[in-house]
Image (cartoon, rainbow, N blue to C red):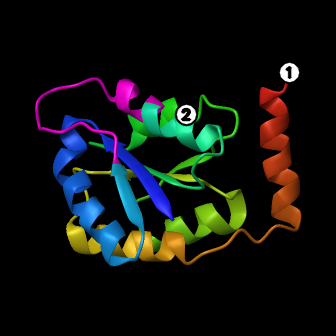
Amino acid sequence: MIIPLASDHAGYEAKEATKKIIEKLGYIPIDFGTHSPDSVDYPEFAVLVSKKVNAGEHEFGVLICGSGQGMCMTANKFPNVRAALVYSPEVAILAREHNNANIICLPGRELNSEQIEAILKSWFSTSFEGGRHERRVTKIHSLTEK
């Protein structure tokens, strides 16, 4: 599976580590930038990954900025994206099981490589439960249909 990912300058180092982790987990990362720690505007990079997931070209995406919030807010502007700010393996599991999240947003300034690996292992090994959660996810999508 191909995993598009992107970061801003504050998430650059974490993104570089995340690419290696994604490969270690058996997936193929595609890096949409940024490609240095020089200051950039996070929405430009969040859009690149979000468009791919929104269009159904890729099942999942990874976005990283300093807090994870800016990337998450931008990604959730797309109707088929359910981006989740994730900072622990437990939150990763709940975001997948209950919300069918398809983009994981990580706080690059807050996580080390070991934490990122644990989060991504949880994320990729967890499936959406459906059931009562399906009704709620459908309600989220109905908001963007109007």
In this view of the protein, which residue sits in the foreground, 66 or 22?
A: 22
Measured from the top left, where is residue 26 in percent x and y? 40, 76
> From what the image shows, is residue 19 above or below residue 55?
below
Left or right of 53: which side holds 49?
Answer: left
Image quarter (top left, top right, bottom left or bottom right) of the C terminus:
top right
> From what the image shows, is residue 29 above or below residue 97?
above
Say few, some or many: other residues with alpha carbon within 10 Å of mark 2 (under 14 / 14 to 19 / 20 or more): some
Which span is picked out in magenta?
31-47
Which residue is rendered at x = 49% and y = 76% of the image?
122
Say few, some or many: other residues with alpha carbon within 10 Å of mark 1 (under 14 / 14 to 19 / 20 or more): few
- Circle 2 or circle 1, nearest the eye: 2
Which residue is the site of mark 1? Answer: 146
Q: Work out how far the residue at label 2 is from the one at label 1, CA to CA, in angstroms.
A: 20 Å
> From what the image shows, is residue 48 above or below residue 31?
above
* Disc marking residue 41: none
**Looking at the image, how many numbered discs can be counted on the residues?**
2
Can you tell which quarter of the image residue 14 is in?
Answer: bottom left
Can you tell which quarter of the image residue 25 is in?
Answer: bottom left
Which residue is rendered at x = 67% and y = 73% of the image?
127
Measured from the top left, where is residue 29 in percent x and y? 36, 58
Measured from the top left, where is residue 130 in percent x and y? 82, 67
Which residue is the site of mark 2? Answer: 51
Asked whether the beta carbons under mark 2 and mark 1 sit within 8 Å of each other, the answer is: no
Tag 1: amino acid: Lys
Measured from the top left, where is residue 126 in percent x and y? 60, 75
Tag 2: amino acid: Lys
**Mark 1 or mark 2, which is nearer the start of the sequence?**
2
